Amino acid sequence: MSREAEDLNRRLLRARDAMDRAYAEPLNVRAVAAVAHVSEAHFIRSFRAVFGETPHRYLQRRRVERSMFLLRETDRSVTDICFDVGFTSRGTFSRTFREVVGEAPSHYRVGHGPMVAPNCFQLWATRPVVAAGVAMQSSSFGDAAAATAS
Amino acid sequence: MITKLNVASIMVLNKDEALDFYVNKLGLEKGQDVKQGSYRWLTVRVPGDVTEISLEEPGPPVHDEATAAQIRELITKGALGGLVFKADDIRGLYETLKSRGVTDFTQEPTDHFYGTDMGVRDPFGNAIRILQQGKVAQKVKA
């Protein structure tokens, strides 16, 4: 692996960290690509090559993970949690949550309480794996299109 | 019976750069720095602590070049393990790190029931967590 590739990895990791840090904010792929100092198209392609999923899917799974955390740990309403973690539409949130977790947010809450592992380990290790065969290939960050459709 | 963690090691891309980060930025102290042939036994530690953190570069004779390249790839994509420290004033430390030019925070100081923690990456991609332990609180009410 060349030094250039290692440097690109490091910059892509910095962009991934930016998503982990700012998942609750309205993020667009152009801004996150800028963190890595690459073009939008190059960012999506190289992120996928390095981390095995598109930036959009990574962010969605982070948002779903944080929503799972809030469902377990707090008494906030599902609607509040949806917006807390960066979704802009309740319909998109519920559909995405169900796709990733396999059950509705309210149902998940009933079955799960707080975890003992420190939050950093939860962030690291409990970001949900998308079930095989589920298509979440969109490369856009915006919920706008999906929100319009829902 | 094992009584103490004596040495932990972390893989870095460059020992000089690592030493600068872990000592001059993060605030650890240099432990051992001994050159034996081409090998440099270089450690850092929490000031006053006995546990040494050995800074290791992938490469020969431990790793052939192909293996070393794989390890460098894993380091730079953040896929290897990291270090977790404790601190007594996490928010003060956060400001100190920023004033020393640290920008690669993975998480600003955040409160949890077990304390306040933050995350930062070393220059190569290794994750570092720092925790200020606090009182155990009840389930968060919002």
Image: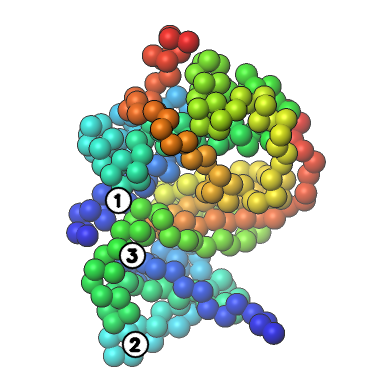
Q: In the image, what residue type sits under mark 2?
A: Lys
As drawn, the residue found furthest toward the bottom would be: B37
For the point 38% across and 31% down, which residue is it?
Answer: A56
Local packing at callout 2 (Cα closer than 10 Å; few below 14, some 14-19, many 20+) is few
The image quadrant that residue A143 belongs to is: top left
Q: Amino acid at mark 1?
A: Asn
Instruction: For mark 1, name the chain.
Output: A
**Quarter of the image with the N terminus of chain A in it:** bottom left
- Is B111 left, or right, of B31 in this rendering? right
Q: Is residue A86 visible?
A: no
Label 3 secondary element: helix
Which class describes the residues within 10 Å of circle 1: few (<14), some (14-19), or many (20+)?
many
Check whether the beta carbons of the residues at disc 1 and disc 3 lie within 8 A of each other. no
Q: Nearer the viewer, residue B128 or A124?
A: A124
Label 3 sits on residue: B71
Q: Which chain does tag 3 point to?
A: B
- How far across and down, in percent of the image, does residue A89 sit? 51, 16
Q: Are marks 3 and 2 in contact (CB under 8 Å)?
A: no
Question: To which residue does mark 1 refer?
Answer: A9
Taking the image as drawn, is residue B28 in sight?
yes
In the figure, A90 relative to A34: above or below?
A: above
| Distance CA(mark 1)–CA(mark 3) | 12 Å
Label 1: element kind: helix
Residue that carries the numbered disc 2 in the rendered image = B35
Residue at 52% from the left image edge and 63% from the top image edge? B83
Q: Count the marks: how many?
A: 3
